Image: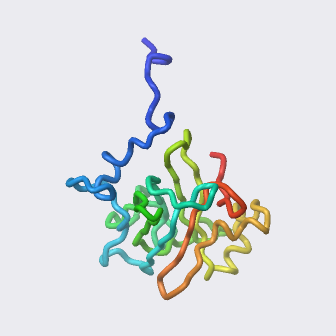
């Protein structure tokens, strides 16, 4: 018997957000732990440890205080967790809800190159109120100029918009990456 047409909408198909309680409870003051946190790599994980911080802004350039950001990335050798030979101490996945100022952060490692022509990048998913479908983008790194110049996905983005995908390195191991949902500085999102 088919269940097609008998199931209701999921939270990502409605206005929401419904994820605060179940997916990022600590971010919103609930007294139980999140299953996934923004701390993706402890000191035992091999690789260059980095801190990525930023804000989510709406079309009026106002901070979005109830968005949820998820990251998924390769390890320092360019392999994704779950593939043979990958260090199981690194999950490659993190989640963070935005704070009252629209801010988020992740502590992770800089990803390696997954394929020969790729630059190091991190996959990003954005969920927030009023967004009926997740928005997908990537984080590239400002200190990877040569690799960025040859990345096939980054090359598909018009030159004037590529900066919206690049995290600025402002100190050793510290990067800034803001997400603009609309407006003149709108982050490039991918139709997946």
- Out of 30 and 171, give the one closest to the viewer: 30
On the image, the x and y values in percent for residue 145 come to 68, 80
The single residue placed furthest to the bottom in the displayed view is 172
Q: Quadrant of the N terminus?
A: top left
Q: Residue at x 51, y 87 (%)?
A: 171
For the rendered model, the colour scheme is rainbow
Instruction: Identify the image quadrant of the C terminus.
Output: top right
| Rendered position, 143 above or below 30 | below
**Residue in the image at 45% along x and 40% along y:** 16
Q: How many marks?
A: 0
Residue 21 relative to residue 187: left or right = left
Between 54 and 51, the one nearer to me in the picture: 54
Judged from this view, the residue extending furthest toward the left is 31
- Give the farthest residue toward the top: 1
What is the x, y in percent for residue 116?
Answer: 64, 69
Q: Is residue 75 left or right of residue 142?
A: left
Residue 95 in view here: no
Percent coordinates x, y for residue 144 in the rendering: 63, 79
> Where 132 sits versus 146, above or below?
above
Percent position of residue 6, x then y:
45, 16
Q: Nearer the viewer, residue 162 or 25?
A: 25
Q: Residue at x 68, y 73 (%)?
A: 148
At 65% from the left and 52% from the top, the residue drawn is: 190
Residue 24 in sight from this viewpoint: yes
């Amino acid at each position: 018997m088919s269940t097609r047409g008998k199931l209701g909408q999921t939270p990502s198909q409605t206005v929401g957000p419904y994820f605060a309680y179940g997916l990022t409870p600590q971010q919103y003051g609930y007294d139980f732990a999140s299953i996934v946190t923004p701390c993706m790599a402890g000191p035992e994980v091999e690789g260059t440890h980095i801190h990525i911080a930023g804000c989510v802004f709406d079309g009026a350039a106002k901070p979005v205080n109830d968005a949820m950001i998820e990251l998924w990335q390769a390890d320092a050798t360019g392999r994704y967790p779950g593939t043979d030979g990958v260090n199981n101490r690194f999950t490659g996945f993190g989640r963070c809800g935005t704070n009252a100022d629209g801010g988020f952060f992740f502590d992770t490692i800089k990803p390696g190159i997954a394929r020969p022509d790729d630059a190091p990048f991190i996959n990003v998913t954005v969920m927030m109120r009023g967004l009926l479908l997740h928005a997908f983008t990537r984080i590239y790194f400002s200190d990877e100029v040569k690799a960025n110049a040859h990345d096939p996905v980054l090359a598909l983005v018009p030159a004037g918009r590529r900066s919206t995908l690049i995290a600025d390195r402002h100190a050793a191991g510290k990067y800034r990456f803001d997400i603009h949902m609309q407006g003149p500085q709108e982050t490039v999102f991918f139709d997946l």
